[in-house]
Image: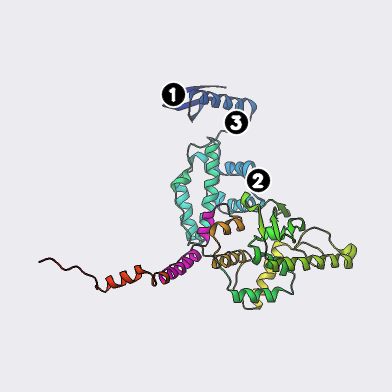
Amino acid sequence: MTGHIKKRAKNSWSVVIYLGNKNYKWYTVQGKKKEAEEFLTKKLQEINSGTYIDNHNMTVEEYMNYWYEEFCMKELSPTTYESYRRNLDKYILREFGKLKLEDLSPLHLQTFYNRCIKLDLSKKTILYLHRIIHSALNKAVMWQLLSKNVADNVKPPRPEKYSANVLTMKQLNKLITVVKSTYIYIPIAIAIATGMRRGEILGLTWKNVDLKKKKINVSQAIYPTKEGLKVLPPKTENSLREITIPKRLAKILKKHKKSQNKNKKLLGKDYIVSDYVCTLENGKLISPSSLNHKFKDILEENNLPSVRIHDLRHTHASLLLSKGTSAKAISARLGHSTIQITMDLYTHLFDSINKQVASKVNGFLRFSPFYWISNRLAKNKFYTKKES
């Protein structure tokens, strides 16, 4: 196989590769001539080694499957790539899987999103589908299978802004009371007191709990997958964090650890030995699905609002905000990758606090010269006589 380079414009080159049978492949390379030459050499080596991919005849389905195997399964968490797989098979590939990758256009995507709306898919789901497609096509551009990402030119419907559900102090106290005699008491107590995610709580081991210093190190999480539960690093790099716990939680955990040791002696060989904090009486790990179902049942039985386990994380954040904790400190405690995520999630809570602050400032001004002067001016008590 042969190829050559043509200059297009300043710092832009056309790389032409002859594939045989009067078939040519054109690429555009930005940069210096040396970079274009290196790109040509690389492509010729791929052709000679049999690893070259000709996107001219590649379908969307063929590419998506390649992207899934080579990127998603290697770089993403099991819960994420399994979710991608379900949505690829159920929606995306059914819509335009047989279409050639290079023929995929913004119109195809817009038509797909409009059809999803007619099928009564939520705006949140449609946005999620768009993000999967956009991510996949971004990789296609990086791998130089496409010259541009057509998803950049399509705007999916925007879902309503998320408003975190939180429990009131009265509801929270009731919840703690009713779960105390159940096997989910420990994970619920940890969720309320630390704001940790469900997977982080269930994946917590005693080696990462320091009861003397009252600290928890979040270093792993449990994820449900098709192959069963998997223990993996948390959601993001920022999720690896140290959390200071309140004295009350430290006492609860200390008592729980003694109870585990007692059950271990009583059950002997029937006890499942592990280092996990959240276990049943026989030492078996509490699964995410079991925690969810039990939590839901308890809420229904006790006339409490229908919230998710994850909403206890939001409740924790709202409690911190109500006590004047800074957004930066909350962001670090929750393990958010940026402080902006914290601000966006709890916008309505920050707005409420800002109103309270404004009210307090207004109270301060009532006792200041500024308030007196501005009040008098408002009543037209001060004026300047016009000179005759």
Residue depicted at 47% across the width and 49% down the height = 109
Q: Which residue is mark 1?
A: 7
Amino acid type of the residue that numbered disc 1 sits on in the rendered structure: Lys
Residue 297: quadrant of the picture: bottom right
Q: Which residue is mark 2?
A: 73
Q: Which residue is mark 3?
A: 52
Instruction: For marks 2 and 1, give the CA distance.
Output: 39 Å
Instruction: For marks 3 and 2, give the CA distance.
Output: 21 Å
Q: What colouring does the structure picture have?
A: rainbow
Residue in the foreground of this view, choosing between 36 and 242: 242
Which class describes the residues within 10 Å of circle 2: few (<14), some (14-19), or many (20+)? some
Residue in the foreground of this view, choosing between 57 and 215: 215
> Which residue is the extreme one toward the left?
388
Residue 351 point in image, percent of width and height: 46, 65
Amino acid type of the residue that numbered disc 2 sits on in the rendered structure: Met
Residue 7 point in image, percent of width and height: 44, 24
Q: Quarter of the image for the N terminus: give it.
A: top right
368 relative to 21 in the view: left or right: left
Residue in the foreground of this view, choosing between 214 and 39: 214
Residue 316 point in image, percent of width and height: 60, 65
Amino acid type of the residue that numbered disc 3 sits on in the rendered structure: Tyr
262 relative to 187 in the view: left or right: right
Q: Nearer the viewer, mark 3 or mark 2?
A: 2
Q: Quarter of the image for the C terminus: give it.
A: bottom left
Magenta span main SS: helix
Query: Which residues, given as a range, are shown in magenta?
Result: 338-362
140 relative to 373 in the view: left or right: right
Say what secondary structure mark 2 lies in: helix
Say what secondary structure mark 3 lies in: loop
